[in-house]
Amino acid sequence: MTQPQKGICAESNLHAQYLLLNVIDDDSQAVRAKLARVLDIFDWYENEHYEAMVTGVIAVGAGYWSELYEGLIPTELTAFPRMQCEDRSAPDTGTDLFIQIRADRLDICHAIGSEVMELLHLHVELVEQIKAFRYLDGRDLNGFIYAQDNPRGMKRRQVAIIDARQDADFAGGSYIHVQRFRHDLRRWKSLSERQQEQVMGVTREYNQPSPEQSDSSHSVRACAPGSDDGHHDLLKQGMPYGDLLIQGLFFISCAASAQPFKAMLHSQIVGNAEGDYDRWLDFTSAETGGAYFAPALTFIRQQAAS
């Protein structure tokens, strides 16, 4: 049976480290073999420090997939859908590899990241590293609950993981989209609580739909509606990051199809025919963006030997 990577559907952790890498080595076989060994690092720390709830994800960039894995390509793997409308934009800054490390201990995230870079350093250059954290009871730094529409329980796997009926060659895989947002919290905090709730479309304290929710509210525009049962076909795994100078959100979505993310992005940036876009984008902006595919564990290990 095809086994997905554990980090795709895992519940949230306290800490995360995100590594965005470009490959500088033409020896694809060596890179494939090293990626399988990254999985071994994840497994070792998961077993040795079980209390830290370690999970990891290895994802390959849309532009690098064909160089790394010759032959078949995931059906919907395409470049990040860059968009621009007025002063709202979603740039494509995708890298060759994206590695997510999550745990309930910051030191374990650091230790895993260090071992991963020691293993890969001859083959890659580190473009960006982001250390993220759980904020309060799962909130973004704007004070509101993050990803309140996430699927729960077994629905997470149904939403995030490709099954054999969708794409038999890549069953167990997941389409990954990432964006690093930078918030203007000083401007955001100049709003009253009522004004903030109008922007977000939910109440800050209890995360209930706001009486003044509108078609331009974040909770409306940042949802990708499901095709049948009204649920949402994205699993959002992002976390806040930052220090006292720069704050934001590292957004990650996992899905069995690349289409829901594209639909959500269009809903946020371009909006509907009446011009309703996501008003939260007046207070945050995407500085990076990338499209990736996280193949099943079985695929990574088999390709390492080919």
Image: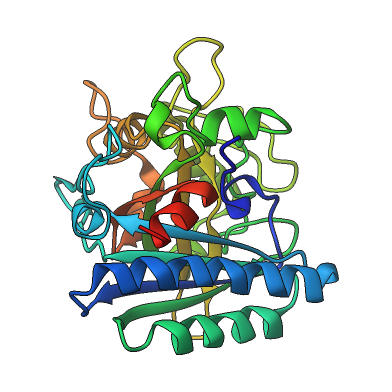
Residue 101: horizontal and vertical position, in percent? 57, 69
Toward the front, the furthest residue is 306
Q: Is residue 119 above or below residue 234?
A: below
- Foreground residue among 119 and 185: 119
Closer-to-camera residue (152/10): 10
Quadrant showing the N terminus: top right
Residue 263: quarter of image? top left
Tell me the residue at 74%/68% (across/down). Answer: 46
42 vs 296, left or right, is: right
Q: Tell me the quadrant of the picture where the C terminus can be found.
A: bottom left
Can residue 283 be seen in this snapshot? no
Return the residue nearer the eye: 107 or 33: 33
The residue shown at (53%, 51%) is 297
Q: Is residue 164 left or right of residue 208?
A: left
Q: Residue at x 52, y 36 (%)?
A: 160
Rendering quarter of residue 210? top right
Looking at the image, is 166 positioned above or below residue 187?
Answer: above
Residue 25 vs 74, above or below: the answer is below
